[in-house]
Amino acid sequence: MTKTTEDRAPYLVWPKGKASWQIRDKRRYISTGATRKPDADAALFEYMKRRDEDAKKAAAGSMASTTLRNILDIWADKRKRENPGTWERKWQYIYKTIYGKSGKMLLHAIDQKWAYWYEQERYEDGVEESTVRQELSTVLSAWRLARNSNPPLTDLPVPELDLPPSSDPREHFISRADAGRLIAAANKDYLRLFIRLCLATGGRHTAILQLTWSRVDLESGTIDLRNRSDRETVVERNERGRRKRAVRQKPRAQVRVEGLILEELREAQDRAASPFVIEHSGKGLGSVHRGFKAAVIRASLDPDTVTPHVLRHSAITWLMQDGEEIYKVAGFAGHSSARMIEKVYGHHHPDFQTSIAKRLAQR
């Protein structure tokens, strides 16, 4: 690609009618006063050195005026590209909250004193410590992105803020007896199958609703909850043009099932009128919340805590209570690492306090 005059670095020319070498910088001509080429080269070197120093000073002045909003915009653009669904559901509200409280503040004023002020402001709004922690963590995340952007928005080091404590992982789960009552309370075939599948596979309720018969192998007893076709794609522009990238999807697994659930799946397949395993009136379902909540109430369970997602928590918790190996549970849940399973569910495992019990017994 041919460079234009606007793209070129400064260079030497001797235009017709001039008495000395000239520096051509875009559309400007700067006289060197030199008639010898070596002297003109030296003048060009000094000119470029001064120009670079002036650019650095201008950049430093621009960085000094960088506000919290400026770095939040970098963070927001990244979130929108990588996970637009979560942006709409969650991150945009965090962005608006921080911007509304402190968006116009200069970065050099963001320190621990500000963090204490922000924390108290949010407590007066009625939010929990975990919410404040997430918002302050967002500021730090945006700051790191701004330092690594091209060009950098700031050269200030990321501050070390004293964050509020994180909340304990949510652990709502139901017992096997509760699950039996819930299944009995489900007055629709599709709802009963939905509950059984969630408990048998540990799958997220959205994965179960999106499950099609093409990913169910009744002969081998395997169900593939991974569905690459439903991943939303984002079109990005870069220096080479356009490219498509799939939006990140939460972990899903390929699992084996056996026993009663296989018989129920065979019966459901015989009467299927759509490609979806969970269907009603010949169509797939986008949600089962209304019917599920009614079944929860009929089963005398708490509808505020027993949601469809609790079925996944319950299946994983039961495996941990049964002493199943953690890495196998992680694979069943679709995670490549056992760290999250150990963090959230580890205390349900019978080996969790074995060493403590042994010490107490010895004493």
Image (cartoon, rainbow, N blue to C red):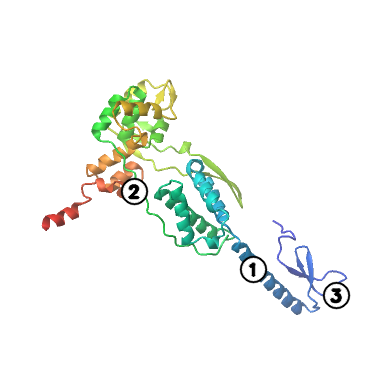
For the residues labelled 3 and 1, the Cα–Cα distance comes to 33 Å
Provide residue 160's location: percent of width, then percent of height.
45, 62
At a point 85% along the width and 75% down the height, the residue shown is 19
Q: Which residue is mark 3?
A: 19
Q: In this view of the protein, can residue 288 be seen by the observer?
A: no
Mark 3 or mark 1, whichever is nearer to me: 1
* Three-letter code, disc 1: Lys
At a point 65% along the width and 71% down the height, the residue shown is 53
For the residues labelled 1 and 2, the Cα–Cα distance comes to 47 Å
For the residues labelled 2 and 3, the Cα–Cα distance comes to 78 Å
Seen in the image, is 55 located left or right of residue 249? right
Q: Earlier in the sequence, mark 2 or mark 3?
A: 3
Q: Which mark is residue 168?
A: 2
Q: Residues within 10 Å of mark 2 (few under 14, many from 20)?
A: few
* Three-letter code, disc 2: Asp
Q: Which residue is mark 1?
A: 57
Q: In this view of the protein, can residue 193 be seen by the observer?
A: yes
| Residue 22 versus residue 232 in the image, above or below | below
* Three-letter code, disc 3: Ala
- SS class, disc 1: helix
Say if mark 2 contacts mark 3, CB within 8 Å: no
Mark 1 or mark 2, whichever is nearer to me: 2
Provide residue 69's location: percent of width, then percent of height.
57, 53
Q: Earlier in the sequence, mark 1 or mark 2?
A: 1
